[in-house]
Amino acid sequence: MAIRVLRIIKKSSTSLDVPKGHFVVYVWEKQRKRFVIPISYLSQPSFQDLLSQAEEEFGFDHPMGGVTIPCSEDIFIHITSHFRI
């Protein structure tokens, strides 16, 4: 994996600690994984596509406090590792 992946802060706990300028997403295919990612990802077209898929699949109701993205962890990391932020 590329070193750039380290910008994603992966948390396995349900801690509510989210650094300023970041937000929580859950990546879910077979098992839900929690990621704390920079807000700057929101401006990336490929991340916006993931958000559209999340809206179609889950709507806007996210009781865990973060957006759930319907893809595998590997795909999520692959997509976000290409961001130049």
Image (cartoon, rainbow, N blue to C red):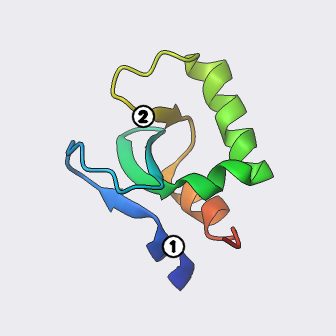
Residue in the picture at 73% in, 51% down: 43
User: CA–CA distance between discs 1 and 2?
Assistant: 20 Å
At label 2, counting other C-alpha atoms closer than 10 Å, the crowd grade (few under 14, some 14-19, many 20 or more) is: some
What amino acid is found at the position of numbered circle 1 in the picture? Answer: Val
57 horizontally vs 9: left or right: right
At label 1, counting other C-alpha atoms closer than 10 Å, the crowd grade (few under 14, some 14-19, many 20 or more) is: some
What amino acid is found at the position of numbered circle 2 in the picture? Answer: Gly
From this viewpoint, which residue is outermost toward the front? 20
Residue in the picture at 62% in, 57% down: 40
Q: Quadrant of residue 79?
A: bottom right
Observer-side mark, 1 or 2, equals 2
Q: Is residue 77 above or below residue 54?
A: below
The one of 5 and 21 positioned closer to us in this rendering: 21
Q: Which residue is mark 1?
A: 5
* Whole-percent x, y for residue 10 in the image: 35, 60
* Whole-percent x, y for residue 69 in the image: 54, 37
Q: Which residue is mark 2?
A: 66
